[in-house]
Every structure is written in C-alpha cells, then in structure tokens.
Image: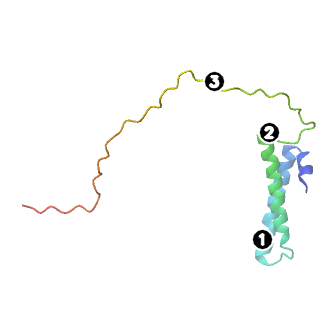
Amino acid sequence: MKVDELRILEADELGMRLRTARRELYELRFKHAVGQLENSSQISKVRHDIARIMTVLRERDFGFGPTAEPEPLGAVAVAEPEAKAEEEPAEEPAEVEDEPKPKRGRGRKKEAE
C-alpha cells in the first residue's frame, strides 16, 4: 500500500482500511504468540501501513495534502520596525533584601517546665 494510493481515497474508505489493518495486526500478534506465524516481518509491514493511513488522516485534519498546481509566490511585503524616538530605560525590579529562610528541620520537643 502506497501513500499516493491512500491520498486519493475518501475518509470513510481510509477508516475502513485502518480498521482492517488493525484487525490484521491483532491476528498476526496472536499467531506470533501462539507460534503459528512463519513470517514475522508481516507485523512490521502492517504497522507501517497503519502509520501511513493515520498520517494521511492527520494531514487532512491539518489541511495538508498534495495540491494540483503550486501557487506562485508573489512579492512579499516586509514590515520595517518603527524607529523609537525616545529610548525608555528598562524598569528595574525593586530590590528585595534576601532574608535567610528558616531551616525546616525536625522540631525539638519542648521540655515541660
């Protein structure tokens, strides 16, 4: 299964193929666990197919995808930064004297007087 083949399919067809591929992966894993699977590379092939299908679905969610004709790039306007007439000094944070924090240790039991 190639990505180009998947991109021309409708969303419901992709959903059906995704379910079919997941079911096939389930069956292959089961056969592998039981010891009936002769070609274990089938598992990775099906996993790649699932990834391809999911990639095409996500591309459609984000609006990506192949376009028939690439749009020509026109002139790009570049905004120039405004010149600052007055440079304002950056506000300095007020200095706070660092007081040592009390240590958190085991509290000593006070002796009864």
Residue 43 percent location from the top left of the image: 82, 67
User: Could you tell me the amino acid type at mark 3?
Assistant: Glu
Q: Is residue 69 left or right of residue 109?
A: right
User: Could you tell me the amino acid type at mark 1?
Assistant: Phe
Residue 74 percent location from the top left of the image: 85, 28
Judging by the rendered image, the residue that carries numbered circle 3 is 82
Mark 3 nearby-residue class (10 Å; few <14, some 14–19, many ≥20): few
Q: How is the image coloured?
A: rainbow
Q: Which of 88 and 108 lies nearest the eye of the viewer?
A: 88
Residue furthest top as drawn: 85
Residue 66 percent location from the top left of the image: 88, 42
State whether residue 79 is above or below residue 111.
above
Q: Residue at x 28, y 57 (%)?
A: 103
Element assignment for label 3 = loop
Mark 2 nearby-residue class (10 Å; few <14, some 14–19, many ≥20): few
Upstream in the sequence, badge 1 or badge 2? 1
State whether residue 76 is above or below residue 35.
above
Which mark is in front, 3 or 2?
3
Q: Which of 95 and 55 lies nearest the eye of the viewer?
A: 95
Q: CA distance from mark 3 to mark 1?
A: 66 Å
Upstream in the sequence, badge 3 or badge 2? 2
Judging by the rendered image, the residue that carries numbered circle 2 is 63
Q: Residue at x 29, y 51 (%)?
A: 100
Judging by the rendered image, the residue that carries numbered circle 1 is 30
User: Could you tell me the amino acid type at mark 2?
Assistant: Gly
Element assignment for label 1 = helix
Upstream in the sequence, badge 3 or badge 1? 1
Mark 1 nearby-residue class (10 Å; few <14, some 14–19, many ≥20): few
Quadrant occupied by the N terminus: bottom right
